[in-house]
Amino acid sequence: MVATALITGASSGLGEEFAWNLAAAGRDVVLVARSRDRLSETAEMLAGATGVNVEILAADLSTPEGTQAVATRLADSVHPIDLLVNNAGLGLKRPFLESTVDEEVGALDVMVRAVLILSHAAAGAMVARGHGAILNVSSVATWLGNGTYAAHKAWVTSFTEGLATQLKGTGVSATAVLPGLTHTEFHERAELDAYDEIPEIAWLEPEYVVAAALAGVRRKQVLVTPSVRYGTMTGVIRVLPRTWVRALARKSRN
Ligand SMILES: NC(=O)c1ccc[n+]([C@@H]2O[C@H](COP(=O)([O-])OP(=O)(O)OC[C@H]3O[C@@H](n4cnc5c(N)ncnc54)[C@H](OP(=O)(O)O)[C@@H]3O)[C@@H](O)[C@H]2O)c1
């Protein structure tokens, strides 16, 4: 496994759970998100509970400056990062034609542009050292074709597959985790009534998703879909005619 991990979107949900899991395993962590206060609070608790070094980097990944600050940290050869977790993400509050182009571009910047730039910075530094891992948080939405969020995640999945192929033999691996619905702040922030509308059986816990993702990284697995439920659903969706998949997608909002 790795010595220091950098996790984007570490102020809540899956990112915060990645930080706890990795710190509990003795890894130093660098926490990235916009909300400095929440990062400081988490950093204090993590360092107190686990004794690892915790660094915080407040950055807005929808901006070129914010993304560049994180890329610079990833390229630091004095304090190397051995695991990059590209986890920051958000749900769009409205369907494509109802949201502003700025909202759409902002989401793309966080979930696509930043993932590309940070992966480039990390992979370059890791290949030069001959080891490391990149974990990109995608989604089962990859296969659903329902709106720009699904398109961003389809890009993350495809990008990770290509990156993994190109990294073969370098000592560096790339993994995409494709979670289904998971209890985090994601749906509340996106103003989705998912908890009322979707039965409890469909939901995963962040601890489970994160443990499955990190186990996949250790195995150098390229695509990880946590849970038998979502693995089976993915298998079925990938063999269905796309007209059927689009008909299903019409039932969801974005
Ligand atoms: N929850 C689900 O059902 C689910 C399912 C599949 C995939 N995912 C994916 O899982 C990842 C984590 O989401 P989550 O469910 O844990 O949601 P969450 O609890 O809302 O966490 C999202 C994280 O992303 C950060 N973030 C958002 N915009 C950012 C920006 N412009 N710059 C930097 N950081 C930003 C947030 O921090 P700040 O607000 O402090 O910046 C927060 O730490 C996302 O990529 C999401 O697409 C979630």
Image: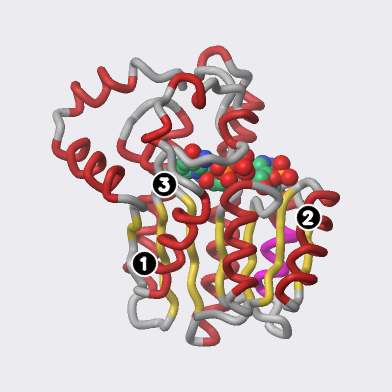
Q: In this figure, which residue is indicated by the disc labeled 3?
A: 179
Query: Residue flagged by tag 1: what amino acid is it?
Result: Ala
Q: Which of marks 1 and 3 precedes in the sequence? A: 1
Principal secondary structure, stretch drawn in magenta: helix
Q: Position of 252 compared to 43: left or right?
A: left
Q: In this figure, which residue is indicated by the disc labeled 2?
A: 39
Mark 3 or 1: the one toward you: 3
Q: Position of 168 compared to 51: left or right?
A: left
Q: Is 64 contained in the magenta span?
A: no
Q: In this figure, which residue is indicated by the disc labeled 1?
A: 164
Could you say whether the residue bearing mark 1 is in a helix, strand or loop? helix
Q: Does the rendering let one see residue 55?
A: yes
Could you say whether the residue bearing mark 3 is in a helix, strand or loop? loop
What residue is at 50 percent from the left and 20 percent from the top? Answer: 196
Q: Is 72 contained in the magenta span?
A: yes
Return the x and y of residue 35 as percentages of the image width and height: 79, 46
What residue is at 58 percent from the left and 41 percent from the top? Answer: 184
Q: Which of marks 2 and 3 precedes in the sequence? A: 2
Extent of the magenta region: 68-75
Measure how far apart labels 1 and 2 are at the Cα level.
Answer: 30 Å
How dense is the environment of label 3, judged by Cα within 10 Å: few (below 14), some, or many (20 and up)? many
Q: Mark 2 CB in 8 Å range of ligand 1?
A: yes
- Res 187 quadrant in image: top right
> Which quadrant contains ligand 1?
top right
Could you say whether the residue bearing mark 2 is in a helix, strand or loop? helix
Query: Residue flagged by tag 3: what amino acid is it?
Result: Pro
Return the x and y of residue 95 as percentages of the image width and height: 50, 18
Q: Which mark is residue 139?
A: none
- Res 52 quadrant in image: bottom right
Q: As rendered, which of 64 and 11 lies closer to the eye?
A: 11
Q: Position of 253 compared to 79: left or right?
A: left
Return the x and y of residue 237 as percentages of the image width and height: 21, 36
